Image (cartoon, rainbow, N blue to C red):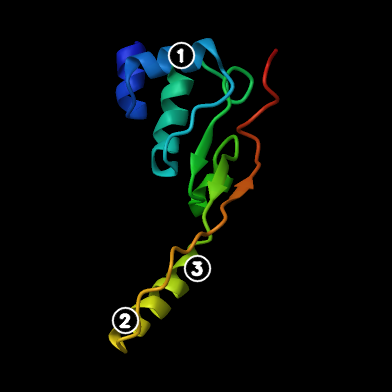
Amino acid sequence: MNLSDLARQLNVSTATVSRALSRPEVVAPATRKQDGALLALRRQQIKVPRDLSLIGFDDARWAQYCDPPLTVISQPTDAMGKMAAELLLSRIKGKPASETIVFEPELVIRRSTATPKS
């Protein structure tokens, strides 16, 4: 597998892969792409986290069972769904839309990340 194949597997540009490999602190694809990213990195004999740290966004249940377990930025999806339902019911009742609602994500550190190399 060459850089182009790896970029296609990660769903990013070749330049992005090249930059990530030259500065191997973090690559952050969407979590649904992390399993493919991990496989593509293994095929390139890139060790996670020794050579490159891998972080995803969203915390799919399977992420904790990968080898290595994947570090993720987790969104409070239960709270988001509850708030969406409450807002929808309010709109149905004719109440005005509320202001912007911000949910705080959480960094779930597992074994797919390492301390950056200096």
Q: Residue at x 66, y 42 (%)?
A: 109
Q: Does dot 3 land on a helix, a strand or a loop?
A: helix
Query: Which callout, 1 or 2, points to the residue nearer the camera?
Result: 2
Considering only order in the chain, which callout, 1 or 3, is on the residue closer to the N terminus? Answer: 1
Residue topped by disc 2: 91
Residue topped by disc 1: 19
Where is residue 88? Give x, y as percent.
Answer: 34, 78
User: Which residue, as the protein is rendered here, is positioned at the far bottom?
Assistant: 93
Where is residue 29? Give x, y as percent.
Answer: 43, 34
Q: Which residue is drawn at 43% across and 68% down?
A: 99
Figure quadrant of the N terminus: top left
Where is residue 17? Give x, y as percent.
Answer: 41, 17
Figure quadrant of the C terminus: top right
* Distance Cα–Cα, label 3 vs label 2: 20 Å
Residue topped by disc 3: 78
Contact (Cβ within 8 Å) of mark 3 with mark 1: no
Q: Is residue 1 visible?
A: no
Q: Does dot 1 land on a helix, a strand or a loop?
A: helix
